[in-house]
């Protein structure tokens, strides 16, 4: 990558050289471990990104494997039951929903349609439907094993595929949730344009990404800094990206999770031209 995707500047500075073993690269091609891997910061806007980056074919291989249950110490159903049985005070999914409720309580009360992109095994959808009324849900998940688990346990439609606009025909949604997805995408700006076009009038996007503050707080070889995460967002750079997509950030916060990670969360709407 030679230019920043936010401001298109080619000026950058080295943040960190990465010589640790990246476990995700082994799932794609172990020879990638020999690549010279680095994190750079754009000198104009401060956006942090990996260089080099995974391409589309690499990503397809990775997301068919990295959530596969052959890499876990539990079955699919054991995973689902463990996560969904956490009490509210121990549930990060409940933490997300509680944050949304505090900002737009009437929106959740009136009910509607939820699309969860990158829904994993369906645990966020499960917690959402358990804590709201009169909502229906749809899910999109690129890892087949997780998509199968989500559809089977939730009883709602889940497509095993990367997201594409109109994936469920002409349905419009009142809430689109995007949990820990944007940092994986080759073209996050196009993605934001696409999902914004699937919102009902007055609908919201809930967006969650790892926050830049983790660079100072977590080990340099942490999962959050490995190659599957193409971008590292801050409040400033996420705001600029949303502005480029003609989206309005209603509320943005950095939240410390129960596992000690820092997430940047935002509730977003389409801009209305007056």
Image: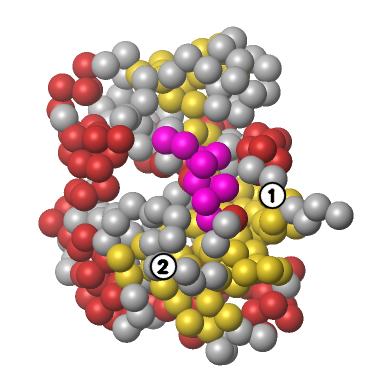
Answer above or below: position of 162 versus 30.
below
Question: Which residue range is magenta in the image?
Answer: 186-195
Residue at coordinates 69% horizontally, 56% vertically from top-left?
270
Q: In the rendered view, does 88 fall on the left or right side of 219?
A: right
Q: Quadrant of residue 13?
A: top right
Residue at coordinates 73% horizontally, 72% vertically from top-left?
104
- Taking the magenta stretch, the answer to whether it contains residue 191 is yes
Of marks 2 and 1, the one in the foreground:
2
Task: Tell me which label, 2 or 1, sits earlier in the chain.
Answer: 2
Q: Nearer the viewer, residue 242 or 217?
A: 242
Residue 79 pos. (x, y %): 27, 70
Q: In the rendered view, does 182 fall on the left or right side of 98?
A: left
Q: Which residue bears the numbered disc 1?
A: 247
Q: Nearer the viewer, residue 236 or 202?
A: 202
Question: For the N terminus, which image quadrant?
Answer: top left
Q: Quadrant of residue 255?
A: bottom right
Q: In the rendered view, does 167 fall on the left or right side of 176?
A: left
Question: For the C terminus, which image quadrant?
Answer: bottom right
Q: Which residue bears the numbered disc 2?
A: 169
């Amino acid at each position: 990558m030679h230019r920043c995707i936010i401001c298109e500047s080619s000026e950058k500075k080295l943040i960190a050289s990465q010589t640790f073993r990246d476990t995700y690269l082994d799932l794609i091609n172990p020879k990638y471990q020999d690549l010279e891997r680095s994190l750079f910061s754009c000198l104009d806007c401060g956006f942090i990104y990996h260089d080099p980056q995974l391409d589309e074919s690499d990503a397809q291989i990775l997301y068919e494997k990295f959530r596969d249950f052959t890499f876990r110490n539990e079955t699919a159903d054991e995973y689902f039951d463990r996560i969904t049985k956490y009490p509210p005070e121990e549930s990060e999914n409940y933490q997300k929903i509680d944050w949304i409720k505090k900002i737009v309580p009437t929106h959740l009360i009136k009910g509607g349609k939820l699309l969860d992109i990158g829904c994993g095994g369906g645990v966020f959808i499960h917690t959402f439907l358990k804590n709201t009324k009169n909502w229906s849900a749809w899910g999109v998940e690129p890892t087949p094993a997780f998509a199968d688990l989500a559809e089977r346990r939730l009883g709602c439609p889940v497509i095993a595929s990367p997201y594409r606009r109109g994936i469920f025909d002409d349905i419009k949604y009142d809430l689109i949730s995007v949990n820990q997805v944007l940092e994986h995408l080759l073209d996050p700006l196009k993605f934001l344009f696409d999902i914004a076009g699937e919102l009902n009038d007055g609908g919201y996007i809930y967006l969650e990404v790892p926050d830049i503050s983790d660079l100072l707080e977590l080990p340099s070889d942490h999962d959050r800094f490995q190659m599957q995460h193409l971008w590292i967002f801050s409040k400033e750079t996420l705001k600029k990206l949303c502005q480029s997509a003609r989206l309005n950030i209603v509320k943005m916060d950095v939240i410390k999770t129960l596992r000690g990670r820092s997430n940047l969360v935002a509730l977003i709407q389409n801009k209305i031209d007056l």
